[in-house]
Image (cartoon, rainbow, N blue to C red):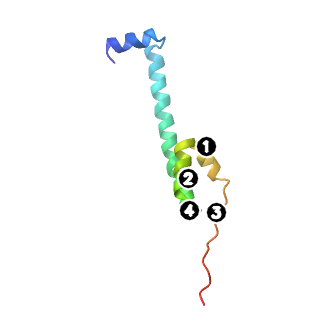
Amino acid sequence: MNDEQLMLLEQLGISQADFERMQTLAGVLLVVTVVSFVLTLWLARRKKLNMGFWTFMVLLMGPFALMAILFVPAKESTSEPQA
């Protein structure tokens, strides 16, 4: 960061150490969200659930969608016996 940006942060009451902690937190949250996105969609496919709905849910709720999908039962196969 340049001096001008540091001065602007100081005017807002944010030190450089605080800013670095916020960057670390944002990075961790991004990684957790991406991992939950992948796991939620993997579980949705495995449980034969609506992928579009669960994609929307994970984008809206993040890691909470992963916890929610764990409680959703899998859909039964709707294969009809052929005569």
Say which label, 4 or 3, has the lower sequence index.
Answer: 4
Q: CA distance from mark 4 to mark 1?
A: 19 Å
Query: Residue type at mark 1?
Result: Phe
Looking at the image, residue 77 lies above or below residue 74: below
Q: Residue at x 46, y 13 (%)?
A: 15
Disc 4 to disc 3: CB gap under 8 Å: yes
- What is the quadrant of residue 61 in the picture? top right
The furthest residue to the bottom: 83
Disc 4 to disc 1: CB gap under 8 Å: no
Q: Is residue 15 visible?
A: yes
Residue linked to disc 4: 46
Q: CA distance from mark 4 to mark 3?
A: 8 Å
Q: Residue at x 61, y 43 (%)?
A: 64
- Residue 54 percent coordinates (x, y): 55, 52
- In front: 24, or 60? 60
Q: On residue 54, which mark appears?
A: 2
- In the image, is 68 to the left or to the right of 20? right
- In front: 26, or 53? 53
- In front: 55, or 22? 55
Q: How many marks?
A: 4
Query: Residue type at mark 4?
Result: Arg
Disc 2 to disc 1: CB gap under 8 Å: no
Q: On residue 64, which mark appears?
A: 1
Disc 3 to disc 2: CB gap under 8 Å: no
Q: Residues within 10 Å of mark 1 (few under 14, many from 20)?
A: some
- Between disc 3 and disc 2, the foreground one is 2
Query: Residue type at mark 2?
Result: Trp
Mark 4 secondary-structure assignment: helix
Residue linked to disc 3: 74
